[in-house]
Image (tube, grey):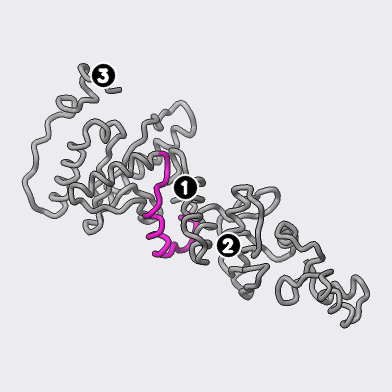
Amino acid sequence: MYTREQLRNKYSLSKKQFELRVSTGQFTQIARNMYLKNPATPAALVHALAESETPAVFTAKTAMELHQEQQLTFPIHVRVPETMRKRETPYLRTYPKREAPHKQIKTVPVARPAVAALDAHKASETSPEVAEFLRISYGGRIGKEKLAQDLGELSRVPDSFKEFLKTIRLGADSKLERQFHHALEGRGLKFENNVLIEGIMWDFQHTTERKLLIEIGAYDFHRETSTNLGWQNYIRDVWKANWAQLNGYTVLQFTAKCVDIELGRCLDAVEEALQQRRGGGRRLAWPEPWKWHRGLREDHYHLW
């Protein structure tokens, strides 16, 4: 990356000679007083910005392309220090922001997927592409926890992006959650999906009784404590539940097997919890689960 003065000095060019080289395509003006020698490709601009003295983190569409090892395209999107001016040209779009969580991809600083998606969403990039990028980036058993952790490092997450997250199925059990959400709606129970509350991601939150939460478990036994990751998942789940309890929330937890073979009972529990949160309705008499849950009865082992 060069300034006008640097190029003129490097090649001993007069003002007229310099302008001629720009007009004939030997130099490309990226933005005001920012030039590249041709060929000015997206990859060349990314590496030039990465090697410049100005701190830069690639974000939005550019970060999405780098994370997914796709071909880079113009304009290049980059976060720069708050003190710098905003630039928007066919080649470059800058975002004067505070420093955000990022990682190195082939020596290039790239915003974490959550930050890249946030900037892409704010820049009005195609929402389906951003949603698919988040689904890929935060799939797996702890996908939602990773997303919450990345967003938690930001000073603020806009409400519009939180609403956008509610439209996306994330994590290992997206199909299961869709099934359960459909069943909730069939009972007239209105819940939002993928809700971020003080840096913690929850599967479902009631639309009006905001302190009623639901968590759906995976088929995989993710609390296997024979590994460090298993212990971390277990600790995370325990303290997530503790946090909710200490802050006055009601959290219902259902396993994938519960949703599969005892869906009606799960919905009954949600209805009763909602009544209790609202201070009305009679309390149902719930017998011990091994007396009614088919997944716990020896004569129903074939269901496993």
Distance between mark 1 and mark 2 Cα atoms: 24 Å
Q: Residues within 10 Å of mark 2 (few under 14, many from 20)?
A: some
Any part of residue 248 in sight: no
Distance between mark 1 and mark 3 Cα atoms: 34 Å
Residue 172: x and y in percent read 42, 39
* Residue interval drawn in magenta: 151-172
In the rendered view, would you say 283 is above or below 155? above
Residue at 9% x, 40% y: name it: 284
Task: Say which residue label 3 marks.
Answer: 301
Task: Say which residue label 1 marks.
Answer: 135
Residue 106: x and y in percent read 69, 48
Which residue reaches farthest right? 12
Is 196 situated left or right of 19 in this image? left
Residue at 18% x, 25% y: name it: 290
In the rendered view, would you say 2 is above or below 149? below
Q: Residues within 10 Å of mark 3 (few under 14, many from 20)?
A: few
Label annotation for residue 115: none
Q: Earlier in the sequence, mark 2 or mark 3?
A: 2
Residue 51: x and y in percent read 75, 59
Residue at 50% x, 45% y: name it: 136
Query: Which amino acid, by three-letter code, is at mark 3?
Result: Tyr
Query: Which amino acid, by three-letter code, is at mark 1?
Result: Arg
Query: Which amino acid, by three-letter code, is at mark 2?
Result: Glu
Is 89 situated left or right of 295 in this image? right
Residue at 38% x, 39% y: name it: 173
Task: Say which residue label 2 marks.
Answer: 99
Which residue reaches farthest top? 299
Tag nearer the camera, 2 or 3? 3
Q: Secondary structure at mark 1?
A: helix
Q: Secondary structure at mark 3?
A: helix
